[in-house]
Amino acid sequence: MSDNIALGARIDSKRDDLIALTQDLVRIPTLNPPGENYREICEYLLRRFEARGFTCELVRALDTPGDCEKFPRWNIVARYDGKTTGDCVHFNSHTDVVEVGAGWTTDPFGGELKDGKIYGRGTCDMKGGLAASIIAAEAFIEHHPDFGGSIEISGTADEETGGYGGVAYLAEQGRYKHVQHVIIPEPLQKDRICLGHRGVWWAELETHGEIAHGSMPFLGDCALRHMGAVLHEMEETLFPALAQKRTAMPVVPVGARSSTLNINSLHGGQAEPEPDFTGLPSACVPDHAKMIIDRRYLMEESKSEVEAEVRAVLEKVKATRENFRYDLNEIWSVEPTMARKDAPVVTSVAKAIGDVLGKEAEYVVSPGTYDQKHIDRIGKLKNCIAYGPGLLELAHKPDEYVGVDDMLDSAKVMGAVLVDLLTQKGAQG
């Protein structure tokens, strides 16, 4: 415990550095889509890491979704080796941020410090967590220069759009084979350990009709009316059934402990005109309609069951509607994942939260997916959690912020985890 107090004091002394680092990261607008300034933020991190003795590699995720010459998918992996052999602890943070949106009262990329909070897009999700992990690692290395093992810190692309140009690509390249422990500093609050996330199944549903003149709709077949019948059946049977399902997973918020389905988008008939078009639409019966389904499911469910429930709705509609035709195609899916409470990284973080914050850790599961899915599914590493500063409900919102004290506390917890996992004293005590 006394060692953690001394390390915590060292981290406190880096407060100004932590603030400046977070502000610098936020001021690089890594908007995704389309994937702007990935190289710039990786080169910024490269300069900092190399100045502090890390070896670094920039990795472009060639031919992944979105990768192109205009918007290349760049990632950075930094490594610091200890004096002796031991475990590898890997901190992974995504560097991309979502669109700004309306409603801001501060500069989204200004990094303004006000009342102990840093404001800007990505402060909470998750550049504040990235900065906290960097400060924690640097302080630990200064405090324990003879540690055994290694520390890695990665800044990766595209988590906000699936992570295929970031962690998934690194995992496919075998870059987690030598890693024993992974912490992803997503904003789940400084006293929470996020064990994993629900599953996701995205699908595209298309209903078909026949085009005809809008003044004689009886000569055609309206695909939008077919889609309306599907929506009605979902409201009558599927949504109530999903609301009755419950999970033993400690998902937050509590409403996400049931299965959920979101209609992500709905389009039909003629395409929307260009903004400068001043004419009128033509009179046509729509011969197609498309719906994107975002279904989140539980450990107690299987993907095949999830798809079967949707198909049952469609087949029920088909039995009652003449000429009803549809196509249902999966867009992507991710199985639920959850680390065990007795996994080494979980017990270490729980101990650190108790030592540093003086309270018991709360165990939670995320309602949506994050890059743990790739480390588990592709990297075959179950000893992975999310832990970081910030409030999950601020993610993707206007006036997003992260508290400086929360970042410092999280950095102290991360530092204590490094002591526990990478020093002989920590291993013994």
Image (cartoon, helix red, strand yellow):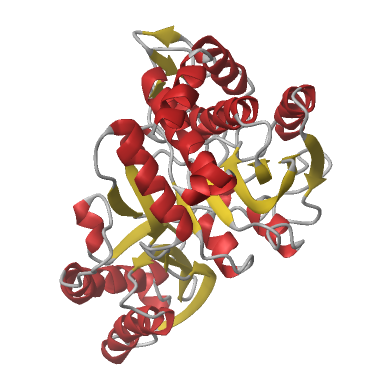
Residue 137, placed above or below residue 418 = above
Q: Is residue 355 left or right of residue 67?
A: left
Residue 155, placed above or below residue 19 = below
Residue toward you, 130 or 340? 340
Quadrant showing the N terminus:
top left
Residue at (73%, 46%) from the top-left corner? 84
Quadrant in the rendering for residue 240: bottom left
Is residue 103 visible from the viewing direction of this image? no
Residue toward you, 97 or 180? 180
Residue 254, placed above or below residue 426 = below
Name of the residue lying farthest toward the right: 69
Quadrant in the rendering for residue 26: top right
Residue toward you, 167 or 104? 167
Q: Is residue 51 left or right of residue 142?
A: right
Instruction: Measuring from the top left, give residue 227's x and y in whole percent.
Output: 35, 70
Is residue 429 visible from the viewing direction of this image? yes
Instruction: Measuring from the top left, give residue 123's x and y in whole percent.
Output: 48, 26
Name of the residue lying farthest toward the bottom: 319
Residue at (79%, 56%) from the top-left corner? 63
Q: Is residue 239 left or right of residue 163?
A: left
Instruction: Measuring from the top left, give residue 133's x and y in whole percent.
Output: 55, 33
Residue toward you, 412 or 24? 412
Count of numbered circles on the image: 0
Q: Is residue 169 left or right of residue 399?
A: right
Instruction: Measuring from the top left, give residue 335's x and y in whole percent.
Output: 46, 71
